[in-house]
Image (tube, rainbow, N blue to C red):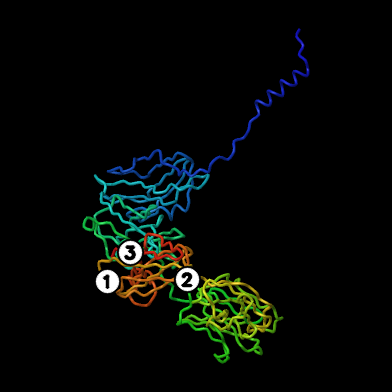
Amino acid sequence: MIRLNPVLLLVVCMLVVSCAKIIPPDGGEKDTTPPLPVLMVPSNESVNFNSKSVYIEFDEFVQFNDIYNQLIISPPLEKQVEIKIKRKAVVITFQEELKRNVTYTMSFGEGITDITELNPAANLQYVFSTGNELDSLTFEGRIFDAFTGIAQEGVRVMLYNDLSDTMPRTSKPYYFTQSEKDGTFKFNYLADDEYQLFALKEANRNYLFDDPTEEIAFFDRPIRLGVDTSKVLLRLSMETDTNQYVSSWEADSSGFLRIALNTPWNRGSRLIPVGLEPTKAQIWDGGDTLFAWIDEPSVQDVSWVFSERSYADTIQYVQSQVAKKTLQLAKGAPGAFDMQDSLTLVFQRPIASFLSDSIQVLRDSIAVDGGVALTGNPFEVKLFGDFEEGVSYDFTILPNAIRSREGWINDTLAFQAKVYELSHFGNVLLTFDASEEVSNGILELYNTNGTVVKRLPVGGEVSFELNRLMPATYKLRLIFDANNNDEWDTVNFDDKAQPERVINLDQDIVVRSNWDMEVDWKLDL
């Protein structure tokens, strides 16, 4: 008999267990592949269709995602179909007799997804005809953002055989498709008929234009397939909400009021204090935020009424004396400034008064004549003086020099700032190359943050000089101001108004110091 060494036997067992150890796989890459149909019964694009149901099997297990809203059947049926899942398959059962000699298109939208990563079976269609042939007409086009000119992906483009003006608000489309990454879209299997074309970029995905924040586009007239064969261009934008209202507001105990509006303040809206002289009320337009306060410390119960057309909202609060705080800069002091613009300081509270002789400006320890002034913006003061290009100056604002409406005063503010030399700036020399005159336009130069730096009216001119520009990368756009209201007007479906046209220059404007950049813009009018 052979005896095994107990120690050796233990080592062998440990090795066997180690070799047999199962290591679970890691998560791996995320599944981004949509479920794909592997079998359709009857087959897709069948003719002489007489089945009561359709069977579609996928290559993986699937589930529904709001399927009854996502599924669009063209032409529409009177009764809703029944949809069920059987393992990896979807079964659609009709609840009515189908019309004879009609091509039906079943578009599933994003109503079917896999069960792991919820990848939708995008662009899934099932087409069949109850007659001897399929409808074969096609229609295509492209959709882009009306303001930026950027191609729009994933926009629902829809055709309606209902030619009424209310069709996108009250009825679902007869046919629909979605735009691709380059903005192109295409309809297949269309019947020879007349249609309305409407595009919708929506969040709730119900195929209805029922939200004013949804972006839309439409074609100006009905399209007759077989006659209108050219590709169409659709310009997508959001309708302007002309009804202004208060989104939110806040007031501190000193009575300083901030009101957030749904759109930038228009002069048709009013903000007035109740029971006070208007001269005691101060209002500053900060765009989509209003700042308001009352220069009357004895007033405690404060009521403001914001009104616009038939809308009115009352803001009521109690103001009281508050402990004095140090008045501080809302933004840091600039390290350099343009002599033409002077040097502007922005504080966190409206300025009530200032002492000019408490502000000192030195050049190499020698005093420089200067002063301080308000800018029209109650939060700002402007420092001016006998400044020279390329020279650095030391600024000192002594304590108590600047006082806010609440009585807050500043501590010592000391900083150094240099005046830009003229050679620091660059210029853009722009020339239009156009087949016709641009008689009513707005030229905008804007930076990479979207902030407009220069804005010029265009009334027949073909050459422009954009001077004293900070070195940076910019963009140019030309707005065709058709109604001459000095702003860009968006789409309005009820008025059948298209967005005003905007042409964006398809190149960067790179401004360098002490350099003139010549731009010859060939306008495609």
Residue that numbered label 3 is attached to: 521
Crowding around mark 2 (Cα neighbors within 10 Å: few <14, some 14 to 19, many 20+) is: some
**425 or 400: nearer the viewer:** 425
| Image quadrant assignment for residue 277 | bottom right
Q: Residues within 10 Å of mark 3 (few under 14, many from 20)?
A: some
Q: Which mark is residue 99?
A: none
The correct choice, above or below, for 84 with respect to 509 in the image is: above
Amino acid at the residue labelled 2: Leu
- For marks 3 and 2, the one nearer the N-term is 2
Q: Quadrant of the N terminus?
A: top right
Q: Which comes before the other along the chain, label 3 or label 1?
A: 1
Q: Type of residue at label 3?
A: Trp
- Which sits in the foreground, 329 or 193? 329
Whole-percent x and y of residue 116?
A: 53, 44
Q: Which residue is mark 1?
A: 437
Q: Which quadrant holds the C terminus?
A: bottom left
Whether tag 3 and tag 2 are in contact, CB under 8 A, the answer is no
Q: CA distance from mark 1 to mark 2?
A: 34 Å
345 versus 124 height, above or below? below
Instruction: Count the marks.
Output: 3
Give coordinates of residue 58: x percent, y percent: 44, 40
Which x, y percent locates residue 193? Answer: 25, 57
Q: Look at mark 2 in the image and give the residue it sits on.
A: 422
Three-letter residue code for mark 1? Glu
Q: Is residue 354 left or right of residue 241?
A: right
Q: Is residue 312 above or below residue 35?
A: below
